Amino acid sequence: MHLFTRNHGGIFGLALPLMLFSPMAFATNGFNLIGFGAESTLMGGADIAVARDTSALNTNPAGLTQIHGQAFDGFASGLRTFDLTHEDSLGNNKHADNKYTFLGGGGYAASFDSLPCTAGVGLFSQGGAGGIFKNINTPFGNRDEISSLFGMAKVSPGIGCRINDSWSVGTSLAVTYASVRQKFFPDTSVGAAPFAGYRLDGATSLKVGFRLGVQYRVNPSLTLAATYTEKIDLPLTDGELIANYSEMGLGRVKYRNAGVTGLALPREVALGFAFKPADSLLLSFKVNWINWADAIKSVTLRATDPENPLAPAVYQIVTAGDWSNQWVFASGLAYNWNKRTTLYLGHNYGNSPIPAQNASPLLAGILDHHITVGVAHQISREWRFTGGFEYMLPVKEQYTSPLFGNAEVRNEALFLHVMLSRRW
């Protein structure tokens, strides 16, 4: 249920959809990307039993023990949406205005001379884009914009240690920064309803979590792995909100203290194994349980301290989340074509955790199947280049909204992933 404090109720208060945040319009696993770093992603996210580059800091830190000497990986990704489209009974049938998204990160790790351990630090884009829909029909008879850009980045220091020839364990911190910017019909004000559109800027969060990982080498051909990731609450604070009270005779009013609560990165448990049926072939699998039901229950936008004392003292919207837990199944293949070239193939499936009744144009994270393909080439003794594509198969969600009536959101996209690595 959606409501404003004071007298902002009625049908338009109830009609506000779950737009307080937008998980990446391209994400399968809720907020999360399917993988981190090129090899992790190009194997479909089936990474915890492989985890042999610096992306292990954000997948399975036990895998750091496979790095001997020093390692650097720099990675970047570019997204092109093909069909991020909202259609509704108001006559809207519009693709999002932001068709491109770019992400990046990197990691450095080094092994100790006197200990069977490797330590490192990495910067990762955990999630990074939302939707921008300009000039769409509103239920008030005009045209306006709805948009939400929600981003998360992690700095992850960590360490992995080899206990014996079979067991490796590791842990990493997740220093997570999140920010959000939103527009919800900012040029619209309806005095009779009443309705006041808004713009939210500058709300951020900085919180710390952790990840634990283990790898067990049964024999040279088989490795088992498990990881645990702790929940990270992400209250977004210290923003400002501008509410449009023009029809109420107050103009645009700035609220100097605005934020969003109720968002979190969820608790996760993953199990996986990697198997080498031949020296040139590596198969990897992962099952991941993601506890979204505990992470996204309800979300509250709240703004206080208005500059105009005649404005309502509190501007607030409470939105049901009611996300469900998610199971993700990932499988990947790495084939050594020759001594210098490796081919990758992967698949990732995750059921959408977002209830259909809480869908919106900005909650397009409903993709379920990802197909990945790529190649890595050893340029020299120290340098290696990895690149490939991640195709997100078309999907659509039909729902009924008090704001838009009978509506549909569609999504289809393609990622390009590249990584440049050095070992010395």
Image (spheres, rainbow, N blue to C red):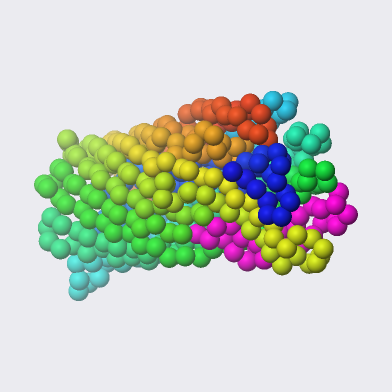
Of residue 229 and residue 241, the one placed in the foreground of this image is 241
Residue 271, given in percent of the width and then of the height, sits at 25, 45
Of residue 13 and residue 217, the one placed in the foreground of this image is 13
Q: Residue 244: in sight, yes or no?
A: yes
Residue drawn at 61 percent across, 60 percent down: 259
Q: Quadrant of the N terminus?
A: top right
Residue drawn at 15 percent across, 63 percent down: 163
Residue 331, given in percent of the width and then of the height, sits at 31, 36
Question: Is residue 254 a member of the stretch shown in magenta?
Answer: yes
Q: What count of labels does the image hold?
A: 0
Residue 130, given in percent of the width and then of the height, sits at 59, 45
- The residue at the far right in this view is 249
Q: Quadrant of the C terminus?
A: bottom left
Write down the region rendered in magenta: 234-261
Question: Is residue 340 a member of the stretch shown in magenta?
Answer: no
Residue drawn at 16 percent across, 43 percent down: 222
Residue drawn at 30 percent across, 54 percent down: 228
The quadrant where residue 333 appears: top left
Position of 324 with respect to 62 (left or right) is right
Position of 290 with respect to 131 (left or right) is left
Q: Is residue 159 above or below residue 278?
A: below
Dominant SS in magenta: strand
Of residue 283 and residue 356, the one placed in the foreground of this image is 356
The quadrant where residue 133 appears: top right
Q: Residue 131: in sight, yes or no?
A: no
